[in-house]
Image (cartoon, helix red, strand yellow):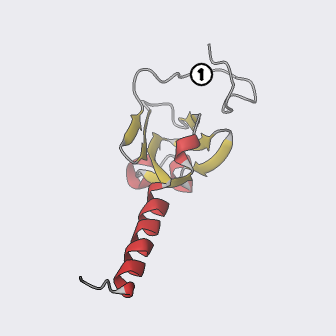
Amino acid sequence: MMKLNRKWIVLLVLMLEIASAAAATGTIDIIADDGFDLFVDGTKVGSSKICCERGDSNICCEPQRFSIANPENVQVIAVKAWDTICVTSGLILSFRYGDFLLNTDSNWKCLSRSVESSWNQPGFNDR
């Protein structure tokens, strides 16, 4: 019968805990011309870099990554995006959690008018 080395057993347990902790974090990659505010379940989690707000989008607007804790509980991803120089604009977003992937596409709703203050909250009726 082979004896197990306790150091290896502890190492394996630590590796499993680290892997579980890493899997419990999701990411959102986003880019918008000219700027954005990003919300998850009503909480602001990030904004575009200042240079994007000055209209220097060709120079410094690159995708930004935001870590999202407890991604399995996310109900709403909302973005307020704006164009400051009135030319063609766009928004691209990807939300990843394990094997789950959500990308912006034609199913996302876009409004160019005022909305209720709860527009970025779970439970908001967007119909």
Residue bearing mark 1: 112
Q: Secondary structure at mark 1?
A: loop
Q: Residue at x 69, y 25 (%)?
A: 123
The answer, for residue 23, to whether it is visible in the render is yes
Q: Is residue 79 left or right of residue 115?
A: left
Locate residue 29, reporting x and y percent. 43, 48
Q: Is residue 24 above or below residue 44?
A: below
Locate residue 108, reporting x and y percent. 48, 24
Q: Which quadrant holds the N terminus?
A: bottom left
Return the residue found at the far left: 1
Locate residue 81, reporting x and y percent. 55, 36
Return the residue found at the far right: 117
Q: Residue at x 45, y 31 (%)?
A: 87
**Residue 41 position by quadrant:** top right
Q: Residue at x 61, y 41 (%)?
A: 39
Q: Is residue 96 left or right of residue 118?
A: left
Q: Is residue 15 above or below residue 28?
A: below
Would you call the spot at circle 1 few (<14 residues within 10 Å), some (14-19), or many (20 or more)?
few
Q: Residue at x 67, y 31 (%)?
A: 122
**Residue 31 position by quadrant:** top left
Q: Which quadrant holds the C terminus?
A: top right
